[in-house]
Amino acid sequence: MNNYKNSTFCPLLFQHLATHPHGGVTHCCVADHRNAISSAKDENNYYYNLNTDSIYNTFNSASFRKARLQVLENRKPKACLRCFDEESKNIKSKRLEEIGNYPDFTLDFAKKITDDEGYIKDLDFDFVELRLGNTCNVSCRTCNPASSSKWLEDYDLLQKHLSFKLTNYNSLLSFKWPEQDGFWDDLLKYCKNVKTFYINGGEPTLIKQHFVFLEKLANLGMTNIKLWYNINMTNLNENILEIWRKFDKVKISCSIDDLYERNEYIRHPTKWDTVLENFNKLKKEKFEIDVTQTVSFMNYSNLDNFYDFFHNKNNVWVHHNYVYDPAILSPNVLPLKYRDSIHQKFKAKFPDWKIKELTSLFSKPDNIDDWEKAKEYTLYLDKFRNQSIFNFLPEFKTLL
């Protein structure tokens, strides 16, 4: 990995398919999505979409070819600056993580399979990320209609009542591509040597067609592929477990954001008893299990107790997915004095490297405008859902 610290090379631009619920494709999941900077598009700003376009044409779009040629020339693609920014703060970026995950996919190999115009004509994915539409039975407060169909009604109400504008998702294309047999047939052509499928949603356990695809892989003897899921812990049954057991390597990332009633508030309308029951059910399987915690201003002060519950008491790794967009949900909207007090509290639970990471990311100066928007957003959503943040997250009785 150290060989690449002074390079811009990232294997994901050459062997990785990163889909999004609406059918768009980007360089990877952490590439800059603002104004579609990282999206697959042609020279005339036509945006490729899996509802209508082939995987081959999408992966060889002009924007993808340009990014490949840039890193081969040791330049930084504009959409990839988040990784380089994190590396400058001594944080292990997605780029460095994936270089470690795919050590055989070197810079020299990338040059070998890429032509002078940036095309990869013999597609053979190592890593496929599938965010299977927006069908979901949960409307987490850090989510939106692009990733959860359950959000549609509340989002419409928020758009009508808030004093500021939200991201408009009305122009997105259909979310039906995961239900089309043609997509799965197309994908199979480029998965001869695939190593990992990362499967997310929406809620992927609700998408029947992808289980048909998994059965096909098993029948073809491709059971050495690693299946890596991110699920909301509400929909787990014996049929799903039976399919997963056919594969040699299965990793389940449990999407849980807080403890007890706090999680029920943030990940509405989940029930803690159901979440914990399914968590314990997974622990009995021979799967790799971790917890993916989406970190927002709502749960930031309780990260230490959450870590203690899952990491120390249940012996599972807790991975943090930080909210950057929209900014009004980021921990950085909290008053700086309060964030500083949280960081002091964390020193009793977190290792030094984690404290440094959190303080480097979430010590920005106060932004009064964003904090006011966060309060307005929260209180209106409480009204529509007949909830009160004060009943679930009592620390906000003072803050709000």
Image (tube, rainbow, N blue to C red):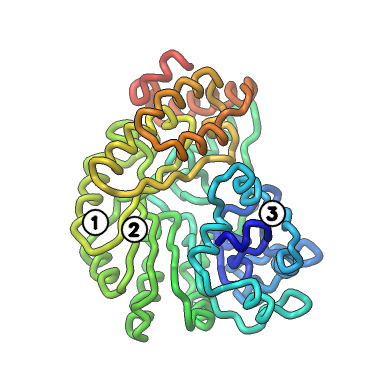
Q: Which mark is residue 79?
A: 3
Q: Quadrant of residue 107?
A: bottom right
Instruction: Sort mark 3 into few (<14), some (14-19) or many (20+) by Cα contacts within 10 Å.
Output: many
Q: Residue 205 carries which label?
A: none
Q: Position of residue 94 (x, y in %)?
A: 55, 55
Amino acid type at mark 3? Ala
Task: Say which element carries label 1.
Answer: helix
Q: Which residue lies furthest to the bottom in this view?
A: 220
Amino acid type at mark 1? Leu
Q: Give the CA separation, mark 2 to mark 1.
A: 8 Å
| Residues at discs 2 and 1 in contact (Cβ within 8 Å) | yes
74 relative to 35, above or below:
below
Tell me what residue is drawn at x 52 percent, y 70 percent.
Answer: 103
Q: Which mark is residue 282?
A: 1
127 relative to 300, above or below:
below
| Residues at discs 3 and 1 in contact (Cβ within 8 Å) | no
Q: Which mark is residue 252?
A: 2
Task: Say which element carries label 3.
Answer: helix
Q: Give the CA separation, mark 2 to mark 3.
A: 29 Å
Q: Which residue lies furthest to the top in this view?
A: 398
Instruction: Sort mark 2 into few (<14), some (14-19) or many (20+) by Cα contacts within 10 Å.
Output: many
142 relative to 125, above or below:
above
| Residues at discs 2 and 3 in contact (Cβ within 8 Å) | no
Q: Position of residue 40 (x, y in %)?
A: 68, 64
Foreground pick, 162 / 70: 70
Q: Position of residue 218 (x, y in %)?
A: 33, 80
